[in-house]
Image: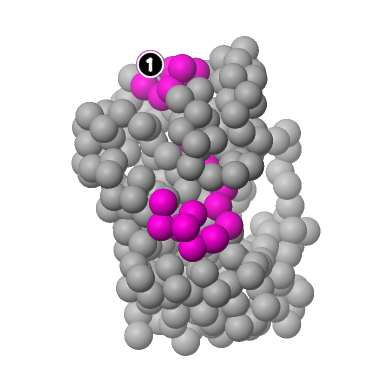
């Protein structure tokens, strides 16, 4: 049985594997994956050696995971890349990782959450779903992702009602999803769930798109405004968080 997994890296110090899925149901022009299909924390020499070697079968994937557990003491799997939920084997992947007592973080746009996947997440004590909210403006959502906002909001509600652990994420994009928009997202989250957490990431500009990277002052203001309603976090850190090893594809 084939998955949509194309790339796996392992963060040695964090004991965490980043499992990257190929393909997405959105077409966001600012997506960082337009810069590279590979983990952007890899060095240039490693990136130059990588070549696509096809999608992994479920058994191949689990062999890689078992090897990482035995060799590195792996404790966590982050499921991301493009959009994991378009992979029909995702419920099986979550179940198998959960059976191995691993922490699981699923990065998703929440457009497609099947009943089978919801059931696996509901039963998983160490699962966390990180939902990327692009915008709360329905017209902008369709224009820039190609998809309706309504299924995203409906699936957020389903996850909340089933007590799945959720963290929300959004990108600060001056002129598109700016400080005022992020404040509205924070207000929305405060109304739908208790003690919501929101990760605010500054845009990494994509060549050929009109949006610039926000200034530190703009990021600080967005975080300050959102902090009135939610717990605010940011991924942005100085330096590399860990030594990174490529588990698939091998050069």
Q: Residue at x 74, y 58 (%)?
A: 14
Q: Is residue 201 above or below residue 148?
A: above
Q: Which residue is mark 1?
A: 175
Query: Is residue 41 left or right of 81 when viewed as pictured?
Result: right
> Callout 1: 10 Å neighbours few (<14), some, many (20+)?
few
Q: Residue at x 39, y 36 (%)?
A: 134
Q: Is residue 174 above or below residue 24?
A: above
Range of residues picked out in magenta: 157-182
> Does any portion of residue 195 appear in the rendered image?
yes
Residue 224 versus residue 75: which sits nearer the camera? 224
Residue 9 versus residue 109: which sits nearer the camera? 109
Residue 119 magenta-highlighted: no
> Does any portion of residue 219 appear in the rendered image?
no
Q: Where is residue 180 shown, x and y percent of the image?
A: 46, 17
Query: Is residue 9 left or right of 5 when viewed as pictured?
Result: right
- State the image quarter where residue 27 is shown: top left
- State the image quarter where residue 31 is shown: top left
Classify mark 1: helix, strand or loop: loop
Q: Where is residue 231 shown, x and y percent of the image?
A: 65, 35
- State the image quarter where residue 1 is shown: bottom left
Q: Residue at x 46, y 33 (%)?
A: 188
Question: How many numbered marks does the figure carry?
Answer: 1
Q: Where is residue 149 shown, x and y percent of the image?
A: 28, 41
């Amino acid at each position: 049985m084939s998955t949509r997994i194309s790339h796996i890296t392992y963060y040695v110090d964090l004991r965490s594997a980043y499992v990257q899925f190929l393909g997405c149901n959105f077409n966001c022009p600012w997506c960082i994956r337009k810069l590279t299909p590979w983990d952007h924390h890899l060095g240039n020499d490693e990136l130059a050696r990588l070549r696509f070697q096809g999608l992994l079968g479920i058994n191949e994937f689990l062999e890689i995971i078992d090897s990482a557990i035995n060799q590195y003491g792996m404790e966590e799997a982050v499921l991301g890349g493009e959009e994991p939920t378009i992979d029909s084997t995702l419920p099986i992947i979550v179940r198998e990782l959960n059976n191995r007592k691993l922490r699981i973080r699923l990065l998703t746009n929440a457009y497609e959450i099947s009943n089978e996947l919801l059931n696996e997440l509901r039963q998983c004590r160490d699962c966390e779903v990180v939902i990327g909210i692009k915008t709360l403006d329905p017209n902008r959502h369709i224009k820039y992702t190609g998809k309706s906002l309504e299924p995203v909001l409906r699936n957020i509600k389903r996850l909340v009602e089933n007590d799945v652990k959720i963290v929300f994420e959004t990108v600060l994009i001056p002129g598109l999803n700016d400080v005022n928009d992020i404040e509205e997202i924070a207000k929305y989250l405060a109304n739908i769930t208790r003690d919501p957490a929101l990760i605010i990431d500054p845009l990494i500009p994509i060549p050929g798109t009109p949006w610039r990277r926000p200034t530190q002052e703009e990021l600080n203001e967005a975080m300050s405004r959102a902090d009135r309603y939610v717990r605010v976090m940011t991924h942005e850190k100085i330096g590399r968080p860990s030594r990174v090893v490529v588990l698939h594809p091998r050069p």
